[in-house]
Amino acid sequence: EAEVAQSPRYKITEKSQAVAFWCDPISGHATLYWYRQILGQGPELLVQFQDESVVDDSQLPKDRFSAERLKGVDSTLKIQPAELGDSAMYLCASSRGEGTEAFFGQGTRLTVV
Amino acid sequence: RKEVEQDPGPFNVPEGATVAFNCTYSNSASQSFFWYRQDCRKEPKLLMSVYSSGNEDGRFTAQLNRASQYISLLIRDSKLSDSATYLCVASSGTYKYIFGTGTRLKVLA
């Protein structure tokens, strides 16, 4: 069964350092999402790609966060500099396209110390 | 007001009980709806899609009420293994895939 791959699974970083997360969606999935989830809350959409284009990054804190999907396949989410409040689970998901089911990777649990 | 809202619970129910959750959405342009299950510290897993005509999968039934802008999930004959957080999603034509905050379910022996 095809899966969304994410790495690393866990990341501990000091505040003010840079950190990056990687996601490889299910093959053929044009839509890719990055979410942030704080314990006890629902996933919050950070950025959404359709192929290589950003279609929604309205909730992405652009002063410190960036995301790219250069070839329309895998994607990287970066935080620089990391802050204590960035500690959360970062989830990547992909879907075939508009209105279709999205499937998640196992996530990256980030702890900023 | 959040675009997708759920009662956070927890809903504590005995084994064998029937339990129902609702999820309201504010964007009338929402066209696709889904329920996910999330276990503690794991990723959300797709439980079922919600069609206009409703959808049933074993003990789980999902319904959509467009007039009142809510979706529901009914779980019959609850099992201990159903204990989890249930997340609803409303997806609009502008690609947005928005989650609710989740409803915690605890099934008690």
Image: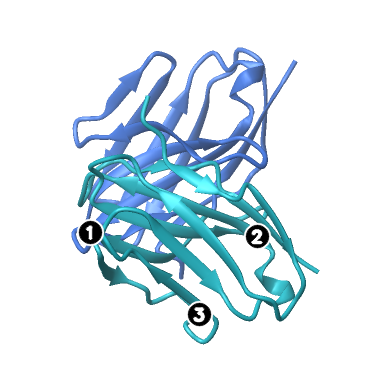
Q: Which three-letter amino acid code belongs to the residue tagged 2?
A: Ala
User: Which is nearer the N-term, disc 1 or disc 2?
Assistant: 1
Image colouring: by chain
Q: Which three-letter amino acid code belongs to the residue tagged 3?
A: Pro
Q: Chain of mark 3?
A: A
In percent of width and height, residue A77 lies at: 48, 66
Q: Residue at x 45, y 38 (%)?
A: B36
User: Which chain is the one coloured cyan?
Assistant: A
Q: Check disc 3 and report its element: helix, strand or loop.
A: loop
Give the number of the mark in front: 1 or 2: 1
In percent of width and height, residue A96 lies at: 23, 44
Question: What quarter of the picture does the N terminus of chain A occupy?
Answer: top left
Q: Marks 3 and 2, how far apart in space?
A: 15 Å
In percent of width and height, residue A79 lies at: 57, 73
Q: Is residue A66 above or below residue B76?
A: below
Q: Residue at x 77, y 72 (%)?
A: A14
User: Which is nearer the N-term, disc 3 or disc 1?
Assistant: 1
Labelled disc at residue A88: 2
Labelled disc at residue A51: 1
- Between A50 and A8, the one lying in front of the other is A8
Q: Check disc 2 and report its element: helix, strand or loop.
A: strand
Q: Check disc 1 and report its element: helix, strand or loop.
A: loop
Question: What quarter of the picture does the C terminus of chain A occupy?
Answer: bottom right
* Circles 1 and 2 in contact, beta carbons < 8 Å: no
Residue wearing tag 3 = A61
Residue A42 location, quadrant: bottom right
Q: Marks 1 and 2, how far apart in space?
A: 26 Å
Q: Colour of chain B?
A: blue
Q: Is residue A79 above or below residue B36?
A: below
